[in-house]
Image (cartoon, rainbow, N blue to C red):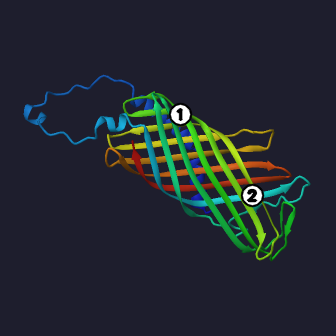
Amino acid sequence: MNPLSTSLARSLRLAPCTLALLLAVALRADEPSAPPAVAPVPPAASAEKPAPVLPAESTQSEKLVFRLGAFAVTNIDTTMSLTSSGGQGGTVIDFGNTLGGDTSVTIFRADADWFISGPHSLAASWYDINLTGHRVIDREIHWGDNVYPINADIDSSFRTSIYKLSYGYTWRKGEKHEITGLIGAHIMRLSTKLSITNVGSSEGLSVTAPLPAFGLGWTAHWTDRFDTRATVQYFGISLDEQQISGHFYDVLLAAEYRVSSHFSVGAGYNRFDLNADVTRGPLTLSVKDAYNGFLIYLGAHF
């Protein structure tokens, strides 16, 4: 990873602290204060035509929001190993450097929000990151029960399908700021495989890991048309009798402009960092996966 990416990643580890500080500012911003003294306005000035605004019901009574767009995933940093119960395998592989794997890709992403009633809401997201690689390796790799010798011509793949679902409870809702507690799951399907080109020998593993997630969300309504959103979600426990263990954090920052009552445009940034061990049968897959994502999207509001 280059120095710029390393610096960016280190800065984003402070994102939870930054969000907490911003939430504190939001709480103070929504506290009532004494109205400032205002000089009487001459009748001629008060007759000016006000700026057009969206109908109040367009933002206050919407129930469903869909956001569809492009997700540019960059600076992908993936390391992995596959170990069998007999102790074979275990070589730690850098997917980009060792196997010539992709380190950036642009994909489709879908997000949705359902405002159920009062403070209750549901949020969902889906995207699929499919990376491939091809390289003549310059060192021996022990992968599960297979050994790939120096100068072997290796094809590789690493695919992450991510389904996010979370329940939100908005426990603080002011004139401009909303703070929401989140609980849900990141359901991740991880698939990886190594094979020698034009030879039938291959080995891999596909697992589905339902990782619980806890977090906070902050939405700011700066004007009747312009909003910003920030969410931080985290997981760090062991599940299923140590079959799944590790941690991840997921940070999303987005800005959205309402072009009409039912449509908006937006852009955002997503930082994701995963460190997990998943055991299925005799094989254990250890993965460290991190990336920066930039998204642009169209929103539909109902």
Note whether 111 is above or below 73 in the view shown: above
| Residue with the most extreme right position | 86
Name the quadrant of the C terminus.
Answer: top left
- Front-most of 9 and 99? 99
- The residue lying at 26 percent from left, 41 percent from top is 53
- The residue lying at 36 percent from left, 48 percent from top is 263
Q: Amino acid at mark 1?
A: Gly
- The residue lying at 54 percent from left, 60 percent from top is 107
- Front-most of 231 and 182? 182
Disc 1 is placed on an element classified as strand
Per the rendering, the mark at residue 252 is: none
Q: Is residue 272 left or right of residue 118?
A: right
Q: Amino acid at mark 2?
A: Met
Mark 1, Cα crowd under 10 Å, few <14 / some 14-19 / many 20+, is many
- The residue that label 2 is drawn on is 80
- How far apart marks 1 and 2 lie (CA) works out to 33 Å
Rendering coords of residue 182 (x, y %): 56, 35
Q: Is residue 194 left or right of residue 217?
A: right
The reply to whether residue 253 is visible in this rendering is yes
Total marks shown come to 2
Note whether 191 is above or below 212 in the view shown: below
Rendering coords of residue 284 (x, y %): 81, 52
**Mark whose residue sits in front, 1 or 2:** 1
Q: Is residue 36 left or right of residue 185?
A: left
Note whether 157 is above or below 267 in the view shown: below
Kindly check if marks 1 and 2 are in contact, taking CB atoms under 8 A apart as contact: no
| Residue with the most extreme left position | 44
